[in-house]
Amino acid sequence: MEVVKVTGIIVNESNYSETSKLLKIITKEYGLISVMAKGAKTLKSKLRSVTTKLTYAEFQIYYKENKISTLVCADIIDPLINIKSDLLKISYASFILELTEQVMKQCNEKAIFDLLANTILKIENNYDPLVITNILELKYLSYLGVKPELDSCSVCGNTNVLTISTNKGGFVCKNCHTNEKIVNPKTIKILRMLYYVDISKITKVDISDNIKEEIDNFINEYYDRYTGLYLKSKKFLKSIKNSYI
């Protein structure tokens, strides 16, 4: 069996036996794959330090399509020290990993790897984790098949937008507005910008707290209404965020 090299991020790890681990790795080449790390739990194993969640590395594996592959070795691409030494950042990263795994179970697209990697690296490089995470959440909605309407009114198509609504699926104009809360006009503009921006090309994030809150609230409510995803890491992240307020 041929050994292949894949670039990936471990999104989940579980015990397989007394000495081994079963890894879920999102890879650039094959999407989400399962990989056995034999003996990785033993103290002397060379695989022990490279088989934990949030490991970003080049993995050498015996690849089996649609089956469990076997890990040979791994070379770290980025140790992600800033994330792993900061409770808030690692909470965001844990949420991102769980969300990505769930998204890929519904849509195993290789392009998702680049979105995940670029998001993790931006947080590692001290960009606002809330804004960066919100961008990823918005982009994932397309892969989940429930993209909000962020170009015009979701009801009539009018481009003169007044506010946003989870119930109506996105932007709402004055004529279609009923009892929806009116958000800051900048929130509408920035929300659309975040959906279309290339994460890898972001060089500056400067958004006021009230606008960040309006955007985050919309995304949270939209996910709850349309995706059916309920993640344990999201509840933990919320509790950590509240402790920083």
Image: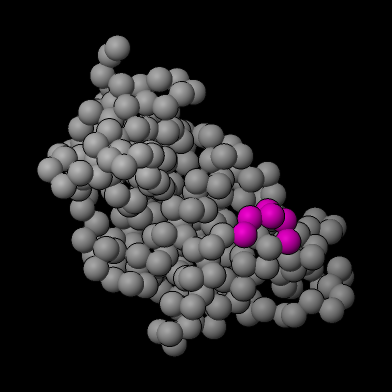
| Residue 21 visible (yes or no) | no
Give 152 or 93, whichever is nearer the viewer: 93
Scheme by which the image is coloured: one colour
Query: Is 123 contained in the magenta span?
Result: no
Q: Residue 81 location, x and y as percent?
A: 21, 61
Q: Quadrant of the N terminus?
A: top left
Q: Decide: is 210 above or below 103.
A: below
Give 244 or 148, whichever is nearer the viewer: 244
Query: Is 227 contained in the magenta span?
Result: yes
Q: Residue 47 location, x and y as percent?
A: 20, 40
Query: In the rendered structure, which segment of residues is drawn in magenta?
Result: 225-230
Q: Magenta residues: mostly which secondary structure?
A: loop
Q: Residue 34 location, x and y as percent?
A: 42, 33
- Farthest residue to the front: give it: 18
Q: Quadrant of the C terminus?
A: bottom left
- Farthest residue to the left: give it: 44
Q: Residue 103 location, x and y as percent?
A: 56, 45
Give 4 or 38, whichever is nearer the viewer: 38
Q: Is residue 4 left or right of residue 136?
A: left
| Residue beneath the point at 27% across and 33% down | 38
